[in-house]
Amino acid sequence: MNTKTMNGEAHETRTKRPPTDLELMMYVDGELEGERLREVRQAVSRDDVLRSKVAALSLSGAIVRENAESGFAGIDLSDGIMARIAADKSPTREARDEAPGPTAPALAPEPKEAEVKPLLRPGLGKVAAKSPSNDNSRGIFALAAIAVAAAAGLMIWGRMDVATPGPQAPVAAVTTPAEAPAEPAQAPAEAPRVAETDTEESDDEVGVAVAAVDFGAKIGTIFYVPTEAATSNHTTTVVWLADDSAGGEQ
Amino acid sequence: MRLPLFALLVAAAGLSLGPGPSVAHAQDAAAQADASVSMEIVVLHGTNDGSGIDPKIGKMPELGKPPFSSYNSYKLLDRSKQNASKASPSTLKLPNDRVLKVSLKDVVQAKKKDEPKRYVISASIQKPGGSDFLPLLEVNAKAGETFFVAGQNHKGGVLVIGIKVNP
């Protein structure tokens, strides 16, 4: 092995170099070629340690190769995906996701998409989450409700004013004629009950105001009789006191 | 503190601008003159004899309205002028021998310039025996206004008494 030339010495030196672990792995895998392959083969044949390393590498390589082939032998991603797409007829993405594919057992479980949940504004609860923040419909509805309530109140108030009997209505004229009997002496006695109740309500427009009255033991009535046209509020005060049947006439 | 101070200022201004003693004296004199009032008293007899309303009564549209319309005929029995004052009431003998007593209780000055003063008049009717037919009737009337007291039986009808304060 010794040479006199520089190249020959160098070549001899390189052949004596023991093979590294990487070279051993390449040797086991059959990736070494040429002169280095022969040198590594000679070194392995001469050294027991190198032979044992080569044997271990060969064994581990065989195990890895066997497991890899058995583990991925049944997986065919392209065929499964294409079959599922062909079988999916739903228009929406959600429907497609929910529809089970015919090759689903063969596929690995797909990771679910993140569930999107609306964020709640602090202090407003679910209501704020349901309606957008720029939604002004509630304020408009509130104003409309207030306007409707005000209109209804004004209408009711106006109708109450119209329904209120005016002071022009003659108190006695409304009630007395129908009840006035043919017997004159009994006419004043019949009238009082109704007239008394009405006169208390319409004393604002009377001409002569009754400040005090004492009928004694008899039945008396105060009438407010309109004197002018219906448009006038002027009335005449009439105090009608029923006389006892025997004492008055002489 | 602002309100009492404002009230004091207003009161002081009112005292300074208020009427003097001479004006007050004139008002007292006017009140004394008003203490006597002239009244017109009419006595009507309402019946259903169909004679209608006596033309002597004059314009009295109330007679055609209830409760006067219970009688279709009214006749003037008496028309008199009476003077009444706070000190001396006026008395009038009625056709049924009862006595009508009318007195002036008070004169109420108007609160506003446009409003007339009002007279507080008291009326009562006494029977011949001394008992009261109408113990008390007190009204507040303006000049020219008439009020009626009716209901006494008289000769198949009723007596209607009208009392008007003359201006």
Image: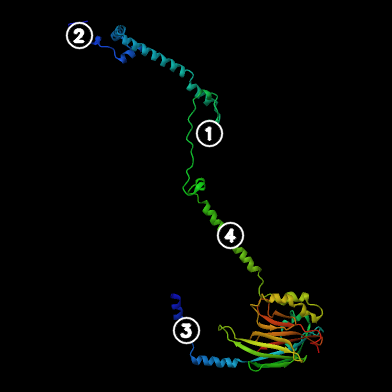
Between residue A158 and residue A202, name the one nearer to us. Answer: A202
Q: Chain for mark 3?
A: B
Query: Earlier along the polypeptide chain: callout 2 or callout 1?
Result: 2
Per the image, label 2 sits on a secondary structure element best described as helix
Closer to viewer: mark 3 or mark 4:
3
Q: Given the image, on which type of amino acid does mark 2 rest?
A: Glu
Q: Position of residue A83 (x, y in %)?
A: 52, 23
Which of pointers 4 and 1 lies earlier in the amino acid sequence? 1
Which percent across, then down, holds residue A160? 64, 67
Q: Which residue is mark 3?
A: B14
Q: Residues within 10 Å of mark 1 (few under 14, many from 20)?
A: few
Q: Which residue is mark 1?
A: A94
Query: Relative to residue B135, is residue B1 depicted above or below?
Result: above
Q: Which mark is residue A73?
A: none
Front disc: 2 or 1? 2
How far separated are the C-alphas under marks 1 and 3?
Answer: 91 Å
